[in-house]
Amino acid sequence: MKTKRIVIGAMAAMMFSTSICSLATAAAADDTVQIIVGNTTAKAGGEYELEVSLADIPTTGAQGINFSLEFDKSLISVESVEIGKLANTAAVNADSTGASLPVFDTYIDNENGFISLIWSTSSKDASYWLQGSGVFCTIKGTASASAKDGDKADVKVAAVRRDTYSKSGVANTDIDCGYFKDGEQISYKITTTDGYVQIGDKSDDKYLRGDANCNGKVDLSDAVAILQYVALPAKYPLSEQGMKNAECDGKDGINGMDALEIQKYDAGLIEL
């Protein structure tokens, strides 16, 4: 099974390198697509789930995206990568190559601490492309049994480890995202937000009311984090613990009133 995954991953990378990222002349789009890795916690030896989201994909859509995630292999391992709602566009049904090459493909390398991810379709119907904001994929894995409470396994967005094109001998440094129009490549700019898996007990002793960004204190930055989450949850996700901490007004659901409570606290008007 592992060998099959390597072959499939290589095939997908080859397909992408001869399509989205192979043209010498390419138009650059002014739009910027965000890749956002979330935050989560896990007990030593326990399982975790970590969401990876895309945000601000223009209405034109993205025909393909190719990037990798580098993680601390001494603290976590990856068992699987599941396609998210954003990427599950049913493009495989409209793609003539879908039967032989997966639209969404991944390659997990725990020995070297990275995951390669690719989503691409040959379909010219943009309704099957990536659009908007949402969860691109969910990473599932296990924290090391030898990890200690307080350890943090960083998960960083990076370019895929490959040559710029076959046998070029030049390492790729770009994250590919874009589409083709009239035979010309249109590439979006990319910004990235790294995430992490925090090792430690998930019990309520880590609860700090109002600490939405989980930095150990309550101030106006937590109010900002809540308002950003309310407006654009895919773009500004809160960690699992942050979601618990953000509930400040005594009512279910995170909203602007929680941020208002923190502002009152910061002004010395109330106690949390």
Image (cartoon, rainbow, N blue to C red):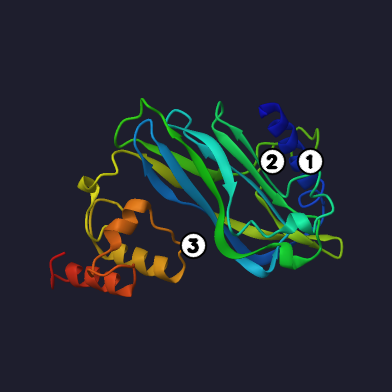
Q: In terms of sequence position, does the residue under pointer 2 or pointer 3 come before the other?
A: 2
Task: Tell me the crowding category of disc 3: few under 14, some 14 to 19, or many 20 or more residues within 10 angstroms, Cα based.
Answer: many
Q: Quarter of the image holding residue 108?
A: top right
Q: In terms of sequence position, does the residue under pointer 3 or pointer 1 come before the other?
A: 1
Can you tell which of label 2 and label 3 is closer to the viewer?
Answer: 3
Look at label 2 and name its amino acid. Asn
Q: Residue at x 47, y 46 (%)?
A: 50
Residue closer to the observer: 235 or 94: 94
SS type, badge 2: loop
Residue closer to the observer: 137 or 259: 137
SS type, badge 1: helix
Badges 1 and 2: C-beta atoms under 8 Å apart? no
Above or below for 269 versus 47 = below
Q: Residue furthest right?
A: 183
Q: Quarter of the image holding residue 218?
A: bottom left
Mark 2 sits on what residue? 172
Look at label 3 and name its amino acid. Lys
Residue 14 marker: 1
Q: Residue at x 63, y 56 (%)?
A: 87
Task: Tell me the crowding category of disc 2: few under 14, some 14 to 19, or many 20 or more residues within 10 angstroms, Cα based.
Answer: some
Residue closer to the observer: 104 or 227: 104
SS type, badge 3: loop
Above or below for 17 versus 271 = above
Look at label 1 and name its amino acid. Met
Q: Residue at x 33, y 68 (%)?
A: 253
Q: Is residue 170 visible?
A: no
Residue 260 marker: none
